[in-house]
């Protein structure tokens, strides 16, 4: 779906959590291909500086904020649900508000954006939805119960919505990264980082650009590819 295929009208892509890490790399990748971008950043518009497109600051887990963004969109070709937060700690020490924040950001945000995107995609009888999950969504990680549960939810949400939307020619897939070198892993000490890397067969963390490339590839994949969770983990899990 590039501008050559649909004449002079650029295709439109909305990305949540575009201010840094994987989301920023995805914005840069789609921007390079001539997409019109709608970029969502959690905190401030200035976090999106340097990126092309329309910038919106707000919480992807807040339905009313997302509705205000979608109300300004006529058409949408690609939706990338990337915004996410991690929480590391024992479940018994986790506060209810931390549980809510993880589930709201990592899972409820998908309900919000998909519910709002689907009518726009139905009008064109076409669309690609790509969710950013995690290998922990299927494997589960100690000290990351909420995160693992939220990403497990992303996986089954992806599979279920893919079935629901396949008759309407809208494809829903997910990428499940292992460890990608972003701020999400900035809390690791040099020793923890080395230990983690030594457990990855590829011998390194993935890059945000590699994740962005996979997401872009999925957005261009055959329409028969839907309901899939594609791992990107250097052979880790
Ligand atoms: P990051 O912390 O570098 O970036 C996260 C982005 O999400 C930021 O732009 C942040 O502003 C945004 N965000 C957070 N809460 C938000 C909210 N409520 N509303 C809107 N935006 C919000 O993290 P990252 O590593 O780039 O992670 C991106 C996605 O990849 C996440 O869904 C994460 O779970 C997933 N992931 C990352 C890794 C990894 O190792 N980095 C591994 C597996 C999955």
Image: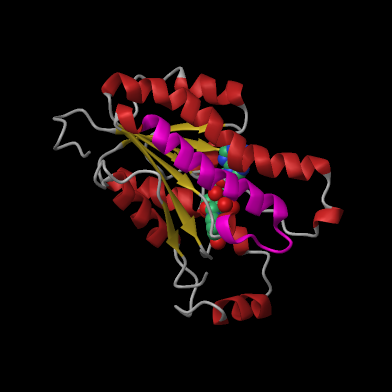
- Give the prevailing secondary structure in the magenta stretch: helix
Q: Is residue 67 above or below residue 138?
A: above
User: Is residue 127 visible from the viewing direction of this image?
Assistant: yes
Q: Residue at x 31, y 19 (%)?
A: 123
Q: Quadrant of residue 235?
A: bottom left
Q: Quadrant of residue 193?
A: bottom right
Looking at the image, residue 13 sits to the left or right of residue 178; the answer is left
Instruction: Identify which residue, 21 or 93, lies in the foreground.
Output: 93
Q: Position of residue 114 (x, y in %)?
A: 47, 30
Total numbered labels: 0
User: Is residue 38 visible from the viewing direction of this image?
Assistant: no
Q: Is residue 143 above or below residue 38?
A: below
**Residue 148 on the magenta segment:** yes
> What segment is highlighted magenta in the picture?
138-165
Q: Position of residue 22 (x, y in %)?
A: 47, 53
Looking at the image, residue 179 sits to the left or right of residue 39; the answer is right
Q: How is the image coloured?
A: secondary structure
Q: Position of residue 195 (x, y in %)?
A: 63, 80
**Residue 174 on the magenta segment:** no
Looking at the image, residue 193 sits to the left or right of residue 73; the answer is right
Q: Residue at x 16, y 31 (%)?
A: 6
Instruction: Identify which residue, 82 or 183, lies in the foreground.
Output: 82
Quadrant location, the N terminus: top left
Instruction: Identify which residue, 122 or 60, lies in the foreground.
Output: 122
Q: Residue at x 60, y 76 (%)?
A: 196
- List the single residue furthest toward the right: 93
Looking at the image, residue 191 sits to the left or right of residue 206; the answer is right
Instruction: Identify which residue, 117 or 75, lies in the foreground.
Output: 117
Q: Position of residue 118 (x, y in %)?
A: 41, 25
Q: Quadrant of residue 105?
A: top right
């Amino acid at each position: 779906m590039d501008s050559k295929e649909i004449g002079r009208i650029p295709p439109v892509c909305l990305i949540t959590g575009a201010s840094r890490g994987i989301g920023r790399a995805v914005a840069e990748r789609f921007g390079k291909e001539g997409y019109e971008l709608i970029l969502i950043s959690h905190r401030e518009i200035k976090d999106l500086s340097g990126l092309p497109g329309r910038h919106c600051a707000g919480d992807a887990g807040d339905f009313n904020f997302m509705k205000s963004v979608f109300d300004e969109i006529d058409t949408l070709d690609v939706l990338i649900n990337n915004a996410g937060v991690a929480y590391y700690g024992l479940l018994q020490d986790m506060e209810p508000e931390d549980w809510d924040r993880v589930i709201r950001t990592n899972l409820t945000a998908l309900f919000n954006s998909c519910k709002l995107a689907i009518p726009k995609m139905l009008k064109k009888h076409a669309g690609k939805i790509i969710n950013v999950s995690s290998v922990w969504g299927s494997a589960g990680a100690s000290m990351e119960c909420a995160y693992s549960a939220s990403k497990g939810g992303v996986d089954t949400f992806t599979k279920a919505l893919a079935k629901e939307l396949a008759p309407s020619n809208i494809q829903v897939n997910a990428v499940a990264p292992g460890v990608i070198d972003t701020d999400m892993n900035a809390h690791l000490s040099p020793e923890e980082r080395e230990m983690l890397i030594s457990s990855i067969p590829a011998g390194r963390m993935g890059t945000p650009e590699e994740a962005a490339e996979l997401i872009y590839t999925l957005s261009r994949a055959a329409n028969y590819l839907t309901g899939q969770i594609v791992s990107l983990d250097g052979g880790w899990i």
